[in-house]
Image (spheres, grey):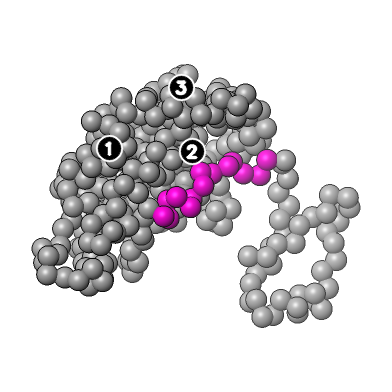
Amino acid sequence: MLYCAKNSNYDTYLDVTEKFLDSFNSVKETIYFDDEPLLKSQSIELMDSTPFYNTFTKVPLFKSIDVNNPSRLEIYHLKLSDKTYDYAQASKFINFAITNYINSRIKINEVKENKEFEALVSKSFLKFLKLNKRDSFPNIMLYAFLESVLNAPKILSSYEITKAPKEHETFSSGIHLLPKKVLKVGNNKLIFGSSNIDNDFITSIEKVFDQIVKIEKNKDEEINFIDENIFRYCFSTEDAKYLSSLLLPNYGGVKPDMSFGIFIAFKYTIENKGSLSNEDYQNELTKQLQETIKFKLPTIQNKIDSLGLKDYSFFIYLLPLEDVDSDTEKIYEYLGGD
């Protein structure tokens, strides 16, 4: 999209001549006039996405869920080393993400200013290893996918929710902000997370939607959980003002739309793996995962329809593993956990 911004030094918009417009004929885009007030902080810093794309491979899909608002359904697999998932790289990525997942942005900025970042990294790593793997793995994956793929900055991770001051209750596995400019439609969205790992895909679907139902029934409390106290707890003064201006009506913001972020890891294997070359295996993996999601998509759609959730946006990320429990153990072994 191309924008013509209002010049703050003038009371009117700058002249846009026909000759100027004609210069964009080859672009074939709509020109929009953007009169939103500019704040010094226009976005919240995201986790560097390079390590994510060094760890995961996206599988192209040709169908998605049918709901009334912008949504995404995407599947990734771990990078392959020959015909085996690269568990060492997955562990390296989690190690990279831990500090940002465990800590608020204001905490990270404070220790950087005091040159104590390495100490915070060590403390965060030890805290993470004490968490239950069946909870910590899907929750940190949910955080990583929402930040790295969707560009939706974390407000609170699942870990931070347990430590944050609480005037309201939340059932979420993490809360993220999706600014309306990312999707270029609708309102700003608060994404409430739900995550699960299980060898059985249906079991995971049941569990994540059970959690989503709890969140949806608790809607007012969930949205009100994010208030100025949370912003002051998690963000710099500048970022807190920016978020308040977006999300809090008392500060000039508009009440955000509720939406849902989902991460599911499930078991998937190719039976004739041993008879395939490395290249053929990689091609077969992509092909079979595409077919599998085509087969499983109605299960997700039926859940959304039967629960009356079509008016919400869903951002769904799926990760196949050869075996959920053993693969998670391998990743944590590289990480240093028993």
**SS at circle 2:** strand
Residues marked 2 and 3 touching at CB (< 8 Å): no
State the residue position of label 3.
Answer: 164
Q: Residue at x 47, y 19 (%)?
A: 165
Q: Main secondary structure of the magenta part?
A: loop
Quadrant of res 307:
top left
Using the image, tell me which numbered label, if any, was put on residue 332: 1
User: Tag 1: Cα neighbours inside 10 Å, few (<14), some, or many (≥20)?
Assistant: many
Which residue type carries mark 3? Answer: Ala
State the residue position of label 2.
Answer: 154
Measuring from the top left, give residue 227's x and y in whole percent: 54, 27
Measuring from the top left, give residue 250's x and y in whole percent: 63, 29
Where is 19 relative to 106, above or below?
Answer: below
**SS at circle 1:** helix
Quadrant of res 194:
top left
Specify start and end residues of the magenta stretch as a single range: 41-54
Using the image, tell me which numbered label, if any, was put on residue 322: none
User: Tag 3: Cα neighbours inside 10 Å, few (<14), some, or many (≥20)?
Assistant: some
Q: Residue at x 32, y 28 (%)?
A: 129
Can residue 129 be seen?
yes
Between 81 and 232, which is closer to the camera in this rendering? Answer: 81
In space, the residues marked 1 and 2 are separated at their CA atoms by 24 Å
Q: Residue at x 68, y 65 (%)?
A: 2
Report the side of 117 relative to 318 (left or right).
right
Q: Residue at x 39, y 45 (%)?
A: 93
Can residue 170 be seen?
no
